[in-house]
Image: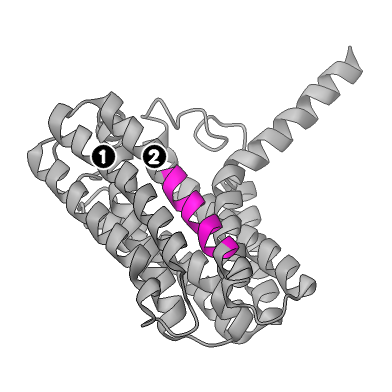
């Protein structure tokens, strides 16, 4: 019996650790950073790749832990977050803060080993997410705009890690993921509207699930698609895209745009969830297409 309790306790600790650092989200961010690195690398360096993966994970884990500390009282009000470690009482604020601090130091230090510029962007990402985006979520829909900045850093961070330089190439990667986040998060804000309302969060641009929000979602989806094919025109330096890859990326974008129009027509939680899922598929497949295209071109 004691052995079973100990095993259950260890499982709970691991589960809470994964929850406080949002492992799934962290892995997706690491995926973006690695994609950016592969696009920017002249020669692949496994050591740098490993540092980037760990540094990226620490960076996102720290941001999420700080976020859950700051929002613990609000998280307790919402169904989707009330069982998180801190609001549920399974983890103390002190423990969460130690994890966040250790991850911050480890993340910046790991990225610094790659190069100081990469560490700087990592630090900026943590600061904006924790100190600007998180407090603004209960005050203004513009929080999504601010949150899109640290959310767009990982893709370009990989390129900076590979080249130790910021130019048109990482700038394009940043812009692509920046604009993508608006339809993605507005879709989430739409189908979780009632739950977000309990916590007092303003996630939709008009504050309502209305035609105005749906129209803006369509517009930002179009911007995302347009930016995604810009490299095919040879105006983004070393970031290039073949015609075939551009057609594939454009087609992927049209699928996402279709669901954005479906949200405009139906304005239902189901339509919003479909848009959210299509947006995740879009950005993942786009990054894969970009990387594969580079190595087979």
Residue 20 seen anywhere in this rendered image of the structure: yes
Q: Position of residue 140 (x, y in %)?
A: 20, 53
According to the picture, the residue beneath numbered tag 2 turns out to be 278
Q: Nearer the viewer, mark 1 or mark 2?
A: 1
Q: For the view shown, which residue lies furthest in the left direction?
A: 211
Q: Which mark is residue 94?
A: none
Q: Position of residue 96 (x, y in %)?
A: 60, 48
Q: Give the magenta part as a residue range.
A: 280-292
Question: Is 255 above or below relative to 123?
Answer: above
Residue 206 seen anywhere in this rendered image of the structure: no
Quarter placement of the C terminus: bottom right
Residue 149, by quadrant, is bottom left
Q: Secondary structure at mark 1?
A: helix
Residue 257, by quadrant, is top left
Q: For the view shown, which residue lies furthest in the top direction?
A: 1
Q: Residue at x 55, y 56 (%)?
A: 288
Q: Do residues under tags 1 and 2 come within 8 Å of each other at their CB atoms?
A: yes
Relative horizontal placement of residue 133, taking residue 45 as reference (left or right): left
Mark 1 or mark 2: whose residue is earlier in sequence: 1
Q: Which mark is residue 258?
A: 1
Q: Residue at x 86, y 17 (%)?
A: 4
């Amino acid at each position: 019996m004691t052995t079973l309790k100990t095993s259950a306790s260890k499982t709970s600790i691991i589960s809470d650790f994964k929850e406080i650092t949002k492992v799934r989200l962290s892995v997706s961010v690491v995926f973006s950073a690695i994609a950016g690195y592969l696009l920017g690398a002249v020669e692949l360096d496994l050591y740098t790749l490993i540092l980037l993966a760990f540094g990226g994970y620490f960076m996102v884990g720290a941001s999420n832990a700080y976020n859950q500390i700051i929002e613990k009282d609000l998280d307790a009000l919402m169904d989707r977050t009330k069982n998180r470690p801190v609001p549920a009482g399974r983890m103390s604020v002190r423990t969460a803060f130690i994890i966040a601090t250790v991850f911050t130091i480890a993340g910046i230090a790991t990225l610094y080993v790659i190069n100081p510029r990469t560490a700087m962007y990592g630090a900026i990402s943590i600061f904006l997410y924790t100190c600007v985006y998180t407090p603004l979520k209960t005050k203004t829909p513009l929080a999504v705009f601010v949150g899109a900045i640290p959310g767009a850093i990982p893709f370009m961070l990989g390129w900076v890690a590979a080249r130790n330089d910021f130019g048109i190439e990482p700038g394009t990667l940043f812009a692509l993921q920046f604009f993508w986040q608006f339809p993605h998060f507005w879709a989430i804000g739409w189908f979780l509207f009632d739950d977000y309302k309990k916590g007092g969060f303003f996630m939709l641009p008009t504050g309502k699930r209305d035609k105005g929000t749906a129209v803006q979602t369509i517009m930002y989806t179009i911007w995302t698609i347009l930016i995604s094919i810009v490299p095919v025109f040879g105006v983004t330096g070393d970031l290039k895209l073949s015609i075939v890859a551009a057609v594939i990326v454009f087609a992927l974008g049209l699928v996402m745009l279709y669901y954005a129009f479906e949200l405009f027509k139906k304005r239902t939680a189901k339509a919003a969830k479909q848009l959210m899922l299509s947006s995740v598929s879009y950005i993942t497949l786009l990054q894969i297409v970009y990387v594969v295209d580079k190595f087979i071109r």
